């Protein structure tokens, strides 16, 4: 593959945004961050940290809020060979703003973003998150996004990508939109909570106006990056690979039940 830029390719850092209020899970999340709710025998975030550790990442920054310091109490300074740091997002102004809180910690290196409220289960030897890191290394991408196929009636919950030349396990896009109506959706491929970024993303975040839900959306920042001529690639989740969201009771119960069945089988 043609790598035209001289980007630093190896990634050792992951930013985990976990400052959201968890309003859809009240009253469970009044004092307990949703990311620390149990999923089987351990909290959701420990499943996510396992996924991150397995990919060889050694440094994690949690973006938290004053109400969610229990995450710092739980993880402390290190676990499973990963060193943890914490930064506070003062106001919940959107995912792009949460990621922007990481700019000093990230510095001038490429990094990944792993949303703290969804796990990804895989039946493959190489996880989607590791494939995403590999794709960043092996292509000219300034950003790589994990995507999954969503039912048409659910596209308005997600960021949706526009494939450039059809869809494959790894494909390039020429557009993306946050929470489109089914009529406006450019495909059914939904952003699945895992990203790899060139550090120039912070410049595009600075130029991003508020978007869907009146918040600063990282999907819009990636759009600005794309429109400036930067290649953006996607890694598609395959059959037997599932993202499990814990943001609503329905989704959380399903994820929990699934996890318990695994322990009982
Ligand atoms: C966020 C992203 C969206 C993505 C979704 C699932 O949305 O903005 O693009 O599809 O996570 O990873 P949220 O769940 O915060 O509304």
Image: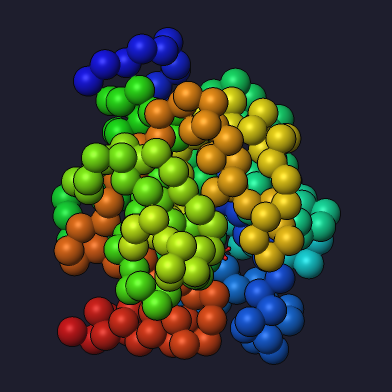
Camera-side residue: 255 or 40?
A: 255
Q: How many marks?
A: 0
Provide residue 203's location: percent of width, then percent of height.
67, 28
Provide residue 207's location: percent of width, then percent of height.
71, 35
- Residue 2: image quadrant is top left
Relative placement, left or right, of 171 versus 117 is left
Residue projecting furthest to the front: 183
Work out whether 131 lies above or below 104. below
Work out whether 185 lies above or below 102. below
Image quarter hosting the N terminus: top left
Provide residue 14's location: percent of width, then percent of height.
51, 41
Camera-side residue: 203 or 18?
A: 203
Work out whether 58 lies above or below 20. above
Relative placement, left or right, of 192 versus 215 is left
Residue depicted at x 40% and y 77%: 153
Provide residue 133's location: percent of width, then percent of height.
35, 36
- Residue 75: image quadrant is bottom right
Q: What is the basis of the colouring in this image?
A: rainbow
Residue depicted at x 34% and y 58%: 187
Image quarter hosting the C terminus: bottom left
- Residue 160: image quadrant is bottom left
Q: Is residue 17 visible?
A: yes
Q: Is residue 130 visible?
A: no
Residue depicted at x 67% and y 55%: 211
Camera-side residue: 138 or 217?
A: 217
């Amino acid at each position: 593959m043609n790598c035209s830029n001289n980007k630093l390719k190896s990634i050792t850092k992951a930013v985990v945004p976990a400052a959201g209020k968890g309003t859809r899970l009240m009253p469970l999340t009044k004092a307990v961050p949703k990311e620390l709710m149990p999923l089987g025998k351990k909290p959701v975030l420990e499943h996510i940290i396992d996924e991150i550790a397995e990919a060889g990442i050694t440094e994690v920054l949690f973006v938290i809020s004053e109400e969610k310091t229990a995450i710092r109490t739980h993880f402390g300074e290190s676990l499973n060979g990963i060193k943890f740091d914490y930064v506070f997002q003062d106001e919940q102004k959107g995912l792009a703003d949460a990621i922007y809180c990481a700019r000093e910690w990230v510095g001038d290196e490429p990094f990944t973003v792993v949303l703290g409220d969804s796990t990804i289960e895989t039946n493959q030897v190489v996880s989607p998150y590791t494939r995403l890191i590999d794709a960043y290394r092996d292509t000219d991408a300034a950003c790589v996004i994990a995507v999954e196929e969503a039912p048409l009636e659910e596209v308005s919950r997600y960021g949706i990508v526009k494939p450039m030349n059809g869809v494959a396990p790894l494909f390039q896009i020429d557009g993306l939109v946050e929470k489109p109506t089914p009529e406006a959706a450019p495909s059914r491929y939904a952003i699945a909570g895992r990203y790899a970024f060139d550090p120039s993303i912070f410049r595009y975040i600075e130029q991003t106006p508020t978007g869907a839900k009146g918040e600063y959306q990282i999907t819009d920042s990636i759009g600005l990056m794309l429109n400036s001529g930067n290649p953006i690639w996607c890694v598609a989740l395959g059959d037997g690979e599932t993202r499990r969201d814990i943001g609503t009771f329905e989704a959380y119960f399903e994820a929990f039940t699934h996890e318990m069945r695994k322990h009982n089988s």
